[in-house]
Image: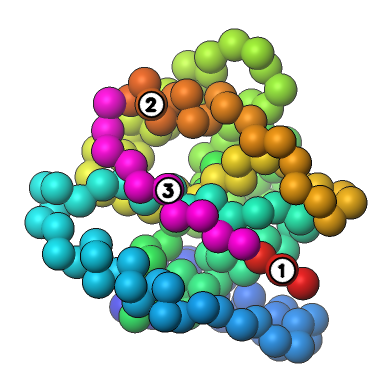
Amino acid sequence: QPQGSIFIRFLGWILAKVFRHTVTEIEIDVASFVEYARALSTLSNSDRPNVIIAPTHRSLYDFLIVSYICFSLPELGLEMPHIAAASDFSRIPIIGWIASKAGAFFVKRGEAKKDPNLSKNLSMITQSPTFIEVFIEGKRSRHRTFLAPKTGFLRCLAESNCNYIVLPMTINY
């Protein structure tokens, strides 16, 4: 992986070991990503939008799989994303620290009002074009069904006055 700190490379190595023992196959629609990367490469850096990777969310493996795809296949043109994680993760010893070092930022869920920390985090992250991974459903489905999307994160994006492309992604297993 040409991009990524030593910390990201170490996490990639750990994920490779974990997936080798827990997953039989991860299949990726490479052609779709190549088409996306080709379209994005035609834009100049100043015209390049922020990319919101929006996968379905059925288990805690989902954010690991998406991050690992970005890490292990740099030819797809997907940079390591900043992950919008529930604030609950920030309070888990060691896991919260690892997540923040890997580029995660934490979002308060379930509040019906605007989160000023989210707006601040997004403005810092999006100063230059970047990738952000967010689960629009807000939480994982425990019944393997799709949940209704939450609109708070999208509303914050709209209010930031930046350009975004949403890259929907499905993870099936």
Q: Say what amino acid the circle numbered 3 marks.
A: Val
**Percent position (x, y) of residue 141?**
81, 48
- Relative to residue 21, is residue 48 depicted above or below? above
Q: Amino acid at mark 1?
A: Asn
Element at badge 3? Answer: strand
Ranked by sequence position, the earlier of labels 3 and 1 is 3
Q: Which residue is mark 2?
A: 158
Q: Is residue 100 magenta?
A: no
**In the image: residue 84, left or right of residue 17:** left
Residue at which label 3 appears: 166
Residue at far right of view:
143
> Which portion, as a residue range, is magenta?
161-170
Q: Nearer the viewer, residue 157 or 123?
A: 157
Circle 2 SS class: helix
How far from the left and from the top, in percent, is residue 100?
Answer: 53, 47
Q: Are marks 3 and 1 in contact (CB under 8 Å)?
A: no
Q: Could you say which quadrant of the image residue 84 lies in? A: top right
Res 121 seen here: yes
> In the picture, residue 20 is in which quadrant?
bottom right
Residue found at x 71% / y 36%: 148
| In this picture, residue 73 sits left or right of residue 146 | left
Marks 2 and 3 in Cβ contact (< 8 Å): no
In space, the residues marked 2 and 1 are separated at their CA atoms by 29 Å
Q: Is residue 57 left or right of residue 78?
A: right
**Can you identify the residue that label 1 sits on?**
172
Q: Of label 2 and label 1, which has the lower sequence position?
A: 2
> In the image, residue 42 lies at what x, y percent?
14, 64
Colour treatment of the image: rainbow
Q: Could you tell me which quadrant the N terminus lies in?
A: bottom left
